[in-house]
Amino acid sequence: MESRFSKPLAGRTALVTGSARGLGRMTALRLADLGCDVAVNYVRSERDAAELVERLLATGVRAAAFRADVADPAAPKRLVEEVERAVDTGIDILVNNAGPFMRERRRFADVSEEEAEALLQGNLLGPMRLDRLVLPGMRERRWGRIVHFGFGRAAEARGWPHRAVYAAAKVALVSLTKTLAVEEAPSGITVNMVCPGDIRGDHKEMRIEDVRGLADPESPGQRPGAGEDVARVVAFLCDPSSDYVTGNIVEVSGGFDPIRNYVS
């Protein structure tokens, strides 16, 4: 018989945004391993979301997929309502993983107003809306976990050439993370941020053992990062015993400095 120590999140429900693929997918799987029911969120990857739900259900937890673009101002409220109606309970864990990113290097003056607004909506305002929606229920239950996603060295608030809007949104989210951690601590809610390194492509859905022995061209002598690296840190922050860990900006980057590497 499994104990609460092997399934410490049994009976809890997590909403992981952008979880059909990539780091969000690995996070959803990790939380399910700990007994957590999972609401999978996607925008276009319906088939991937459905496949993930099947994998999650096979572990014995409850799971369902919900389509919503957190960059749409009207979507967060609808998403939270649909999840809570489907699971007939509140959202105990919110992982704000979703957020648009522009790979193309472009100066701030060359980013259109529409593009800038989309980056702010997806990376800052969307998570803020979701936080506001789940906090009342967490307060009522006297328990909650909120995890934001940032980028390497976000807490230093340095300038990031060619990534001005994205960086501004995430740095603002750093401040929100620290503020909410203080405001919500009396209600048993922790708020932290995880800052992944430059984990790309297939590596986002790999386990640590899959990348052992591989070389990382950006960091000589080190292996590349894997999705599991990030997922296991998120899972730690969501653990009931991590209630003394809040307001932290946790680097999961292998020491990689995205700002230095992009401008060098």
Image (cartoon, helix red, strand yellow):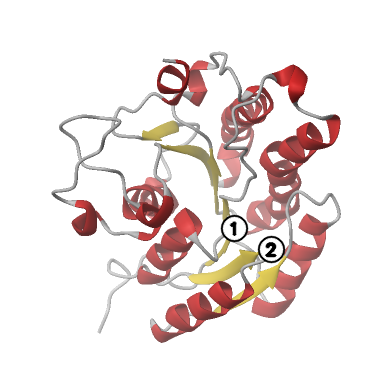
Which residue sits at x=50%, y=22%? 155
Q: What label sits on residue 97 in the rendered view?
A: none
Determine whether, in the image, residue 170 is placed left or right of residue 130: left
Front in this rendered view, residue 64 or 227: 227
| Gap between marks 2 and 1 measured at Cα | 8 Å
The relative height of residue 100 versus residue 51 in the rendered view (above or below) is: above
Q: Percent from the top left, x then y, of residue 121?
A: 76, 41
Neighbourhood count class around disc 2 (C-alpha, 10 Å): few under 14, some 14–19, many 20 upward: some
Residue 161 drawn above or below residue 25:
above
Q: Please state which of residues 180 and 112 is positioned toward the viewer in this rendering.
A: 112
Mark found first going from the N terminus, 2 or 1: 1
What residue sits 60% from the left and 34% below the top? 104
Locate the N terminus by quadrant.
bottom left
Is 47 on the left-hand or right-hand side of 55?
right
Dot label at residue 43: 2
Question: Which amino acid does the dot numbered 2 rest on?
Answer: Val
Q: Amino acid at mark 1?
A: Gly
Residue lying at 47% horizontally and 36% vertically, measured from the top left: 246
What percent of the width, then of the height, locates residue 88?
Answer: 68, 78
Q: Is residue 63 visible?
A: yes
Residue 226, horizontal then vertical, whole percent: 32, 50
Kindly check if marks 2 and 1 are in contact, taking CB atoms under 8 A apart as contact.
Answer: yes
**Residue 32 on image: x %, y %:** 42, 70
Q: Which residue is mark 1?
A: 18
Query: Does dot 1 land on a helix, a strand or a loop?
Result: loop
Count all numbered tags in the image, as a single digit: 2
